[in-house]
Image (spheres, rainbow, N blue to C red):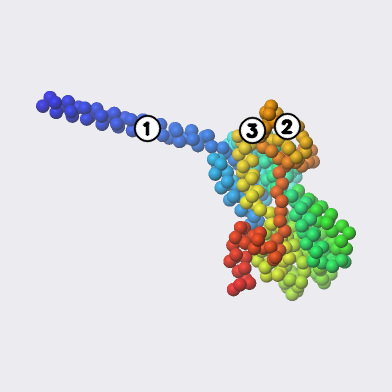
Amino acid sequence: MRQIKQVILGLCFLFCLFFLTGCQRQRNSPAASEENVERRIQIGISFDSFILERWQRDRDVFVSAARELGAEVNVQNANGNMEEQVEQIDYFIQKKVDVIVIVIVASGEDSSVLTEAVSRAQRAGIPVVAYDRLILNAGVDLYISFDNGQVGRLMAEHMREHLKDGGELLQICGPMADYNVPQIMDGFEKILAGSGLNVMETEYAEEWLGETGFTAADDYLKNHYSVDGIMCGNDNLAGNAIRALSERRMAGKVCVVGQDADLDACQRIVEGTQCMTVYKPVEKLARRAAELSVALAEGKQILIVGTGDAAVPGCRDDMEKTVSCIEVQETMNDGTYNVPCERLEPIAVTRENMDEVITGKYHEESDIYLNVRN
């Protein structure tokens, strides 16, 4: 009997020990989980808006790539409002994120308020990345985009190749408040110089309003009756310009160019109503931006290697090997500061190279050829 009691007491002791250990684990588990969450890099990104198709792609790829690298991303939509974007940046500062990424609102509003917000973030020790659009006079830590001058050059080269000397062109550009727009126009003008092609009128789509493409083309045709080519700041403007041409049965007879390789633009190209678009591989841009943002959050410094600049302290060791830095090839002047810059190359897309560049990589074949193979 005594032995049985001892066995029972022993079992009770083991049960209690097991129960207490389990409780201890439960108490420790949330704390450990919280520590893991706190150690994850936090990135705040504010977009101009998601009206344009491409910004949705940028967002999805950026968030996915950042998560693969162990970072969490807080996405905000400024809805084209500069004041709202400033509030979002201040919110990120309050949340003490590790990096802030900004697609500046191209609304034509005074951007100095955003410059001040960038300064507040940097004083709080938070690096700021300008994504796709440069923020003027702000001295951001890094600017990543495409070679926008090359976008304009590709458009002009296509027109020179397909139009005769003396051809008359209409330009429908984005807002000058978007720093990419003057770069595109400059590249376009340089290639047209001496070509015999003449830009008759230039219109600007404030806030990238697509309807401007229709009204600008419609008004031009009411006064001039014909046009040889229309250079559009993006594919949304191009689609609306082609709508004006269609109403006059001129679609496919006028060389229309755009940029972004939107699905409907690719469909128009294979249908024959749009001549070309400039493809900017946004997946590559967004992924690279996520990589650079995480590197900045980890405290890595920037080394400019393409201009002969001196190494940033801490980036190279005595053996002249890269230690812990981000290498970029150039700087771009934002009006006040020379900002470290990384630019990716755009690609001209026509009916001839559609399958090579776009099909199965950016859009699916069944979607691109939806209207020509059914």
User: For this rendering, which residue is in front, 82 or 319?
Assistant: 319
Q: Residue at x 71, y 51 (%)?
A: 345
What residue does disc 1 label?
Answer: 25
Q: Residue at x 40, y 31 (%)?
A: 28
Looking at the image, tell me whether mark 2 or mark 1 is earlier in sequence order. Answer: 1
Could you say where residue 339 lies in the image, as x and y percent from the top left?
Answer: 74, 39
* Residue furthest to the bottom: 249
Few, some or many residues within 10 Å of mark 2 (<14, 14–19, 20+)? some
Report the amino acid beneath label 3: Ser
- Quadrant of the snapshot with the N terminus: top left
What residue does disc 3 label?
Answer: 324
Q: Is residue 103 above or below residue 360?
A: above
Using the numbered discs, state the Cα–Cα distance from disc 2 to disc 3 in whole angstroms: 12 Å
Looking at the image, tell me whether mark 2 or mark 3 is earlier in sequence order. Answer: 2
- Asked which secondary structure carries label 2, the reply is loop
User: For this rendering, which residue is in front, 289 or 361?
Assistant: 361
- Asked which secondary structure carries label 3, the reply is loop
What residue does disc 2 label?
Answer: 311
